[in-house]
């Protein structure tokens, strides 16, 4: 029994020494990468209602007018324009039908042109609904690779400072999330004297101006461990 206990103690001591040795033989570093991106895909929300024309112009007529005007301006409405919902509300004077659409455009120039066309139609509501970057997933994947390369470089710098080298990577922690990216507009989206933002003074919304979107920085951070060679 005594011999068994001594053997067990020897194994525990050896395991502890081995664990300490493995800690001393690794270098733990962080890697970081970032990229500035701007939106290139926009969704415009369009609402038409019978109240706009007091019922004299049907929703079908208004829809045909939207499609005709956008097509005349060079837009592909078959792919970009889609109906979101169609409903009626009841008031004293009867039912008032309303339809909501989404219209997708690419690039700030197309966005500005679309707003100009839609403003001419005197619709119930036209507003910028959402913005995004079409190649966001590809950018995030590249940032992962850049962050990993940065971690390796950092490990090499630290090891070189003590005249050592790094070996294989033994651990990678990637806990970044792929959440939504939000883009801010530098100025109100103005369409021929009308601003889509309530807080833009009327004096600054007299004529259409080029739309500018602030760059948004997306980043990626990883943690990695490399073997530390003698």
Image (cartoon, grey):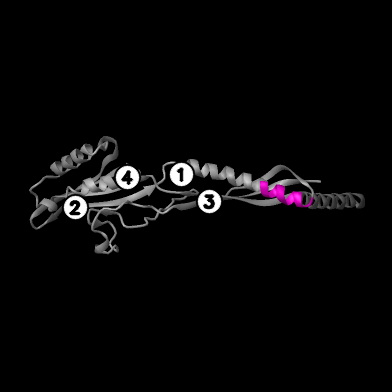
Q: Is residue 160 magenta?
A: yes
Query: In the visual, does 63 lie left or right of 13?
Result: left
User: Is residue 198 or residue 4 the one in the foreground?
Assistant: 198
User: Is residue 79 or residue 96 the one in the foreground?
Assistant: 79
Residue behind mark 3: 219
What is the CA distance from the residue labelled 4 to the residue labelled 1? 20 Å
Residue behind mark 4: 109
- Decide which of tag 4 and tag 1 comes sooner along the chain: 4
Q: Quadrant of residue 105?
A: top left
Check disc 4: other Cα within 10 Å, few if <14, some if 14-19, many if 20+. few
Check disc 2: other Cα within 10 Å, few if <14, some if 14-19, many if 20+. some
Residue placed at 26% from the left, 38% from the top?
A: 75
Residue placed at 37% from the left, 49% from the top?
A: 131
Q: Is residue 170 magenta?
A: no
Residue 118 at what x, y percent from top left? 21, 47
What is the span of residues highlighted in magenta in the rendered image? 153-162
Label number found at residue 136: 1
Residue placed at 29% from the left, 39% from the top?
A: 80
Query: In the visual, does 32 lie left or right of 42?
Result: right
Q: For the residues carrying marks 3 and 4, which lies nearer the camera in this image?
A: 4
Residue behind mark 2: 124
Query: In the visual, does 96 lie left or right of 136?
Result: left
Query: In the visual, does 146 lie left or right of 12?
Result: left
What is the CA distance from the residue labelled 4 to the residue labelled 2? 23 Å
Callout 4: helix, strand or loop? Answer: helix
Could you tell me what secondary structure mostly forms the magenta stretch? helix
Callout 2: helix, strand or loop? Answer: loop
What is the CA distance from the residue labelled 1 to the residue labelled 2? 33 Å
Picture layout, residue 124 above or below residue 110: below
Residue 45 at what x, y percent from top left? 27, 49
């Amino acid at each position: 029994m005594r011999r068994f206990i001594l053997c067990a103690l020897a194994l525990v001591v050896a395991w502890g020494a081995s664990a300490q040795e493995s800690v001393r033989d690794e270098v733990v570093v962080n890697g970081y990468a970032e990229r500035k991106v701007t939106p290139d895909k926009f969704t415009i929300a369009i609402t038409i209602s019978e109240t706009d024309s007091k019922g004299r112009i049907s929703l079908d007529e208004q829809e045909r007018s939207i499609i005709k005007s956008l097509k005349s301006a060079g837009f592909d409405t078959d792919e970009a324009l889609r109906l979101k919902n169609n409903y009626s509300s009841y008031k004293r004077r009867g039912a008032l039908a309303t339809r909501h659409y989404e219209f997708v455009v690419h690039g700030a120039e197309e966005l500005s042109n679309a707003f100009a066309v839609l403003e001419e139609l005197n619709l119930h509501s036209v507003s910028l609904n959402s913005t995004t970057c079409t190649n966001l997933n590809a950018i995030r994947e590249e940032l992962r690779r850049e962050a990993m390369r940065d971690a390796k470089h950092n490990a090499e710098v630290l090891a070189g400072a003590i005249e050592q080298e790094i070996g294989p990577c033994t651990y990678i922690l990637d806990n970044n999330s792929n959440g939504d990216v939000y883009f801010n507009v530098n100025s109100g989206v103005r369409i021929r004297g009308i601003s889509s933002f309530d807080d833009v003074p009327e004096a600054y919304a007299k004529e259409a101006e080029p739309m500018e979107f602030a760059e948004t920085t997306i980043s990626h951070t990883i943690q990695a461990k490399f073997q530390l060679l003698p």
